[in-house]
Amino acid sequence: MNFDDVFNAQNTKGISPEKLAFLKAMSSRQAGGNAQEMMAALMSAQGNAKKQGVSFSEQERDLMLELLLNNLSPEEGKKARSMIQMMKKMKR
């Protein structure tokens, strides 16, 4: 699934064009790979966004994750989802 598929499937109303452009650029950089590479790409993207003064809501972060997870194999996607759940539990 590519960005346009996710864009059409997700509720992206209210997300600024600048943020959508950032998400699209991020999604095109991360293709394939494994769960660790995906998490590294996510952390890098968040760092780059912060440097540019861009912050994301929970909905926007979920869209980012969806874009990255859809670029993984089913097995790697399962690993990544496990890591994400663990991180969310630690954050509470």
Image (cartoon, rainbow, N blue to C red):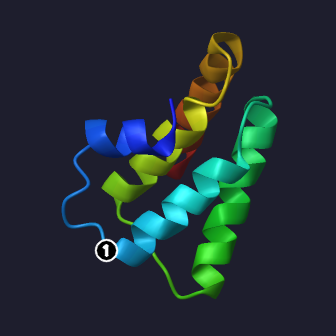
Task: Report if residue 53 is visible in the image.
Answer: yes
Tell how many labels.
Answer: 1
* Residue located at (71% from left, 20% from top): 76
The single residue placed furthest to the front in the displayed view is 4
Q: Specify the quadrant of the image occupied by residue 43.
A: bottom right
Left or right: 30, with 58 as reference point: right
Whole-percent x and y of residue 5? 39, 36
Whole-percent x and y of residue 28? 64, 50
Residue to which mark 1 is pinned:
16
Q: Looking at the picture, tell me which residue is in the foreground, 60 or 3.
A: 3
Left or right: 71, with 36 as reference point: left
Left or right: 5, with 80 as reference point: left
Whole-percent x and y of residue 73? 68, 17
Whole-percent x and y of residue 24? 52, 57
Give the crowd class for mark 1: few <14, some 14-19, many >=20 residues within 10 Å: few
* Residue located at (64% from left, 32% from top): 83
